[in-house]
Amino acid sequence: MEKKFRSINAIFAILEQDNKILLQKRQNTGYMDGLWDVSVSGHVEKNEPISSTVTREIKEEIGIEVTKENIEFVSFEHNYLLGIAHCNFYFKILKFEGVPHICEVEKCSDLKWFNINKLPEDMIFNRKIVIQNYLKGINYNETNWA
C-alpha cells in the first residue's frame, strides 16, 4: 500500500492595533534567523485543534491570554519549502489580555510594532506577501521554494 501524502501544519497569529502589526525577530531557530516574522507562529501538535494551537502558542511565545472566541481565520497559505508541503493558517487576534513580551528569549531577539502598510525590508518574504494580501482581502497564497 502506498504511503499517503503528509504535510506540516502551522499557525500564525496577526496582532494588529492602531494600524500597527506586532512582529518578532527570529534567532537560533534554524529557519530564517535574523529576519522579522509575525509575532507568533507554531506547529500543530498531534490531536490538537488548530484553535488550541493558536491560544497555546500565543501564551508560550508572547505571554498574553486569548480565548478561542477572539481569534478569526484570515488566510491560508500552501507552500513547498525544499520539497516539503506546509499548510499555514493565519489568524487575526481580535482581543487579548496582558502585554505582549518575549517569552522565548532563545528564539526571539526583538518584538516590535510596525506600521502594517510599511513592513520591514528584512521580513520573511512569504509572511510579508500574506500580510499584504490580508490587507487586500485575499485569503489564499501559494509559494514554491523548491
Image (tube, rainbow, N blue to C red):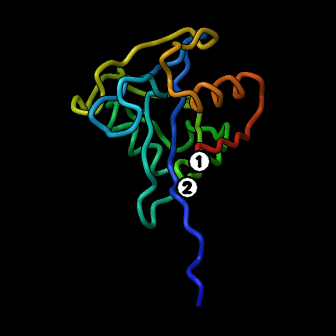
Image point (65%, 48%), residue name: 78
- The numbered disc on residue 83 is 2
Q: CA gap, disc 2 to disc 1?
A: 6 Å
Q: Secondary structure at mark 2?
A: loop
Q: Is residue 96 above or below residue 73?
A: above
**Is 4 left or right of 109, judged from the image as shown?**
right
Disc 1 marks which amino acid?
Answer: Ala
| Residue 36 pos. (x, y %) | 44, 22
Does the residue at mark 2 contact the one at mark 1 (Cβ under 8 Å)? Answer: yes
Image point (30%, 27%), residue name: 108
**Is 85 left or right of 76, judged from the image as shown?**
left
| Residue 88 pos. (x, y %) | 57, 46
Q: Which residue is mark 1?
A: 146
Disc 2 marks which amino acid?
Answer: Gly
State the residue in front, 131 or 79.
79
- The numbered disc on residue 115 is none
**Is 29 left or right of 9, judged from the image as shown?**
left
